[in-house]
Image: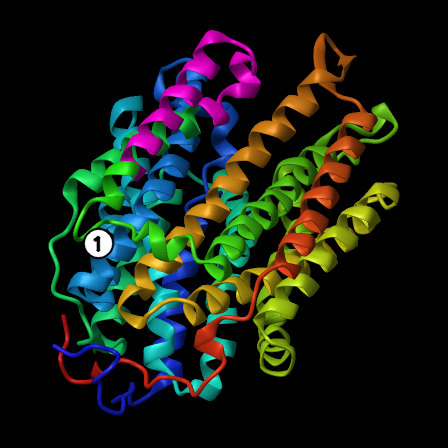
Amino acid sequence: MTTSATAPAPDRATHPWAAVVALCSGGLAASLTQTMVIPIQGELPRLLGSTASSTAWVVTITLLAAAVTMPVMGRLADIVGKQRVLVASAVLLVVGSVVCALSDSLAPMLVGRALQGLAMGYIPVGIALLRQVVPPRLAGSAIAAMSATLGVGGAIGLPLSAWIVEVGDWHVLFWVSAGLGAAVLAAMLVLVPRDVDTTPARFDVGGALGLALGLVLFLVGISKASEWGWTSGRTLGFIVVGLLVLVAWGAVELRTAEPLVDLRATARLPVLLTNVAAVAVGMGMMAQAVVVPQLLQLPEVLGYGLGQSILAAGLWMAPGGLMMMAFAPVSSRLMRTLGPKATLMIGAAVLGAGYLLALVMTASAWQLAVASIVISVGVGIGYAAMPALVLDASPPHEAGSAVGVNALSRSLGTTLAAALMGTVLTSSTVDLGGIGVPTEGAFQACFAIGAAAAFLGVAIAALIPRSPATSGPVAPAPQLATSDRA
């Protein structure tokens, strides 16, 4: 095994762009699972023979599993190799999708959705591997494209899922996901070379369990706050106990010889501030995902609803996600010419500008779609810059773990935003046929919060110091084995 300090010149993939396409396809398939159940969420109590509060966990458990798995998979990737972890993630996606496809009750559905969430560890590991797969001059474009799959998967997933549900059986959703997962698995085995720059170490099982417990408790409290109430005993109990577990976990990790997460490295200013900015940008991204579909689907009789079907709403939002991929080359060029710090600031500023547009462009579906496109462009630019900042400030043998923690930070931001937006939208309602729906002012408040979070991200990014890793010659990339497959 080699380390970054002694690694010979890298033996990169024979066809690097084929490997990039394979990796991005995997990210697309994994992120698609996050939105695929939205069209059937209201029907889940009937479909699974359970209550609405219980079936809400079909969405929540996937988000929890994704948050937990990102730093864990990142650390495993540094120890056993990134390509092997990507193969394992693709297997989890296939198995989880098949379990869901065969489910007609709540318990197996939750198991399958949890496995699908675990497959989200694919994205940070894939980003960390990209710098080893492609030549340095192409790394920025590849990372930007991989980061964009987070938005593209959601953009494609909503209208695709709505169409499948309209024309066929809802189980087909998960058979499609299983088929995509199988194709990704084959691509990982055939097109993506195995990295040999692993670090022999003991995997910190206790650290993984402690982090999982603390995150689950904390995120359950946050994600259910709008339903339980922010001041309820259950909400405060989950949040406080979760934070106490995380504090205890951190204290133990600092004394562990081979920790799951190197907290000292994470505390370096370039990494720490990038991760804090990731929380803010993640909040900005999620505000759109929560608010825009509801506003599009509310009936026109309210005066501010746009009367769109689920399928139509998904189609109106799809261009935003696709624009994230279209702007990947722009993000790469910005990083090459201005650097990732300035690129992150530009992305967060565009994101905030999109929300300001949304405050005044809600009279028709096309206006809201334009605002959504601007928001998505900002997210795409910002998401492309964050992994580059983290990788520049982290040693190569901790690349997977570092990007995993950054992905966790984004996930914390999206969870906080979902809970906050839910609270705002339910705190100010108007009666519509005996059902309380959010007022126009509630939607405007959500857009204002999204803008504030984005501009806070700009301010935080401005404080990121220049990383020592970027001040000298670029270290040689870890070696890859082009013929050694998993």
The quarter of the image holding the C terminus is: bottom left
* Residue that appears at 50% across and 49% down: 157
449 lies left or right of 304: left
Is residue 234 on the magenta stretch? yes
Q: In this view, does 321 lie above or below 218?
A: below
Q: Give x and y (percent) for residue 56.
A: 44, 23
Is residue 240 on the magenta stretch? yes
* Residue that appears at 40% across and 60% down: 27
* Residue that appears at 68% across and 33% down: 294
Q: Give x and y (percent) for residue 220.
A: 42, 25
Q: Give x and y (percent) for residue 442.
A: 77, 26
The image shows a total of numbered marks equal to 1
Q: What element carries label 1?
A: helix
Query: Which quadrant of the view contains residue 202?
Result: bottom left
* Residue that appears at 49% across and 26% down: 222
Instruction: Check the image and tell me how it is coloured.
Output: rainbow
Q: Give x and y (percent) for residue 465.
A: 56, 65
**What secondary structure do most residues of the magenta stretch adopt?**
helix
Work out whether residue 354 can be spotted: yes
Residue picked out by circle 1: 91
Q: Residues within 10 Å of mark 1 (few under 14, many from 20)?
A: many
Kind of residue sitting beneath label 1: Val
Magenta part of the chain: 221-250
Viewer-proximal residue among 428 and 73: 73
